[in-house]
Amino acid sequence: MDLNSYLIISAILFSLGLFGVITRRNGVAVLMSIELILNAANINFIAFSRYSGMDFSGHIFSLFVIILAAAEAAVALAIILNIFNNFGSINIDDANKMSQ
Amino acid sequence: MTGINLIFWFIAILTIVSGSIVVLSNNLIYSAVSLLFTLLGIAGLYVFLWADFIAITQILIYVGGILVLIIFGIMLTHRITDVTLSQSSNQQILGGGIVLVIFLGLSYMILNTPWLQNSAVEPEETIKQIGNLLMIDYLLPFEVASILLLAALIGAALLSRSSK
């Protein structure tokens, strides 16, 4: 368990999240994949902070990433609910118009 | 030392396996539940990296807040008759190929870069340093984040309100 193992774990999580964003068509599933990508970035921040001599700036950055993820999830779910009310499904390929 | 290594690899494999269930499962509820285990595993990795405050924050905000919000989203966007809560994926082979290429490039970069590494002693407490940084060096981003959260709150309430 050195720096490289954390970075590889984070790269695997990032790839999984990217795969989900590319292939999934359900809006909520895409949102979950984006959460995976954000968490992968957070692991990188904390790992570099730990292995560069315990610099706490990495902790602050990951704290802000968590705050932004919370705000993003709230707004994204509100938008998904609106898409569902307007189009009857949350397949994001169908939602290609600004209004019905 | 070997016991700690064992626990570390157990947490890492738990994180990765449940993360792959998140993106591969056809049932959205299974995806949400395995996202719970992924987030808990990531919190465990934070503990290994001496970031106890971030680990607690992860559990509180992600598991307690965002995951509940996502499950609400799943429940509200499916009709009652639609019991399977399933979803479809497309272009899995093409997407998988592209993602595999990106992952191999990332791994090559990670394993071949001489990273800067300084030794450090384990800090007695992390909350004090984080609080000092938030109140001195990062005070402006801290205040901007509060405005952002307020705007997100109002925006989400406005968007999800049912129109007359």
Image (cartoon, grey):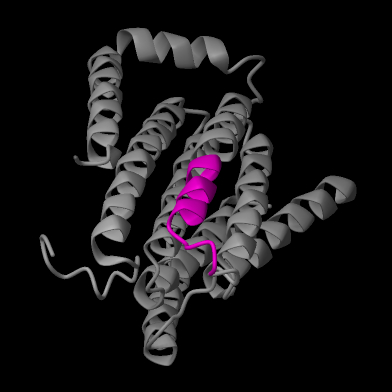
Query: In terms of depth relative to the viewer, which is nearer, B141 or A6?
Result: B141
Task: Determine the residue positioned at 37% across, 90% down.
Answer: B94
Look at the image and tell me in which quarter the N terminus of chain B lies: top right
Q: Which residues are magenta?
A: B67-81
Task: Determine the residue positioned at 43% across, 57% down.
Answer: B77
Residue lying furthest left in this view? A98
* Left or right placement of residue B154 versus residue B129 in this view: left
Residue B23 position in % (x across, y down): 52, 69
Residue A2 position in % (x across, y down): 63, 51
Query: In terms of depth relative to the viewer, which is nearer, A65 or B110?
Result: A65
Quadrant of residue B20 in the image? bottom right
Query: In terms of depth relative to the viewer, which is nearer, B24 or B120?
Result: B24
Task: Determine the residue positioned at 51% across, 57% down.
Answer: A10
Residue lying furthest front in this view? B164
Look at the image and tell me in which quarter the C terminus of chain B lies: top left
Task: Determine the residue positioned at 41% across, 26% down.
Answer: A60
